[in-house]
Amino acid sequence: MYTYGRMFGITREALVNDDLGAFADFSRAYGVAAASLEGQLLVDLLASNPTMGDTVALFDAAHSNLANPGAAITDTTLSGARLALRTATDLDGTTIIEAPPKYLVVPAALETVAEKYLAVLYPATAAEVNPMQGKFELIVVPQLDGQIGIGLVLLRRSRSGADVGILVLKRHAGPASRCSGRLGDSRDEFRATLDYGVGAIGWRGAYKGNS
């Protein structure tokens, strides 16, 4: 868990003369910046592919959670990813976790393709059924664009907790801002802080498809 922050100072006179409202919506700007930072931290984690406790990378063939190079989003690749996560075994190497993926994370460039494979259809025949409709919650992360080797990421929502953990202080589920004056000065200070952390707890609930 880390604390991130931003601060700027402005005089009372500048606020009073702010006819265009340039400084009136600073809290919204802080919120946008915080959301961007949270997304970037997750992307940095996925792109770094950290080494886990077994000395193997988070996404690795040894963990059975890494697609072959060039695997695009198709029924076949999504089905294979789902099978890999559903049949993953627990720490004892025998007990099947039996937890299908819940989230499909893609870069913005693949948003339309992902929507097609998750679309709800009303087929006339069994051959026209979309087996993936309603199976995943789509999460589009623009920061993933340009990250070599990340075409899609599937994450499951574990019964015992997430495997790619996002840690947030409950009292501050978002940036906290405050304004304070400075003694002996006509300036006001606006501060925003965000307590946030992201880390890989385990590999059994995450699957990556290469672009």
Image: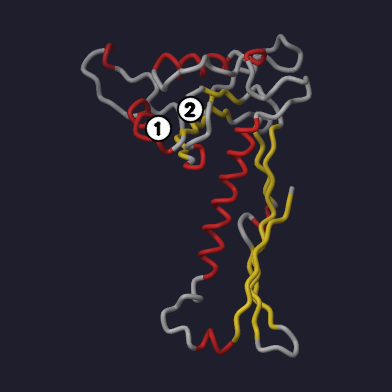
Task: Say which residue appears at 67% left-offset and 61% top-offset.
Answer: 5
Q: Is residue 112 left or right of residue 89?
A: left
Task: Say which residue appears at 52% left-offset and 64% top-offset.
Answer: 29
Q: Which residue appears farthest toward the top when viewing the image?
A: 94
Secondary-structure class at tag 1:
helix
Where is residue 53 shown, x and y percent of the image? 78, 24
Secondary-structure class at tag 2:
loop
Task: Say which residue appears at 40% left-offset and 29% top-offset.
Answer: 134
Where is residue 172 shown, x and y percent of the image? 66, 57
For badge 1, the amino acid type reads Leu
Task: Say which residue appears at 61% left-offset and 33% top-offset.
Answer: 46
Q: Give me the disc on residue 151.
A: 2
Residue corresponding to mark 1: 110
For badge 2, the amino acid type reads Gly
> CB atoms at circles 2 and 1 under 8 Å apart?
yes
Q: Residues within 10 Å of mark 1 (few under 14, many from 20)?
A: some
Where is residue 7 shown, x and y percent of the image? 65, 69
Q: Residues within 10 Å of mark 2 (few under 14, many from 20)?
A: many
Q: Give me the disc on residue 86.
A: none
Q: Is residue 80 left or right of residue 180?
A: left
CA–CA distance in space, label 2 to label 1: 8 Å
Q: Quadrant of residue 89?
A: top right
Looking at the image, tell me whether mark 2 or mark 1 is earlier in sequence order.
Answer: 1
In this view, 34 is above or below 9: above
Observer-nearest residue: 64 or 144? 144
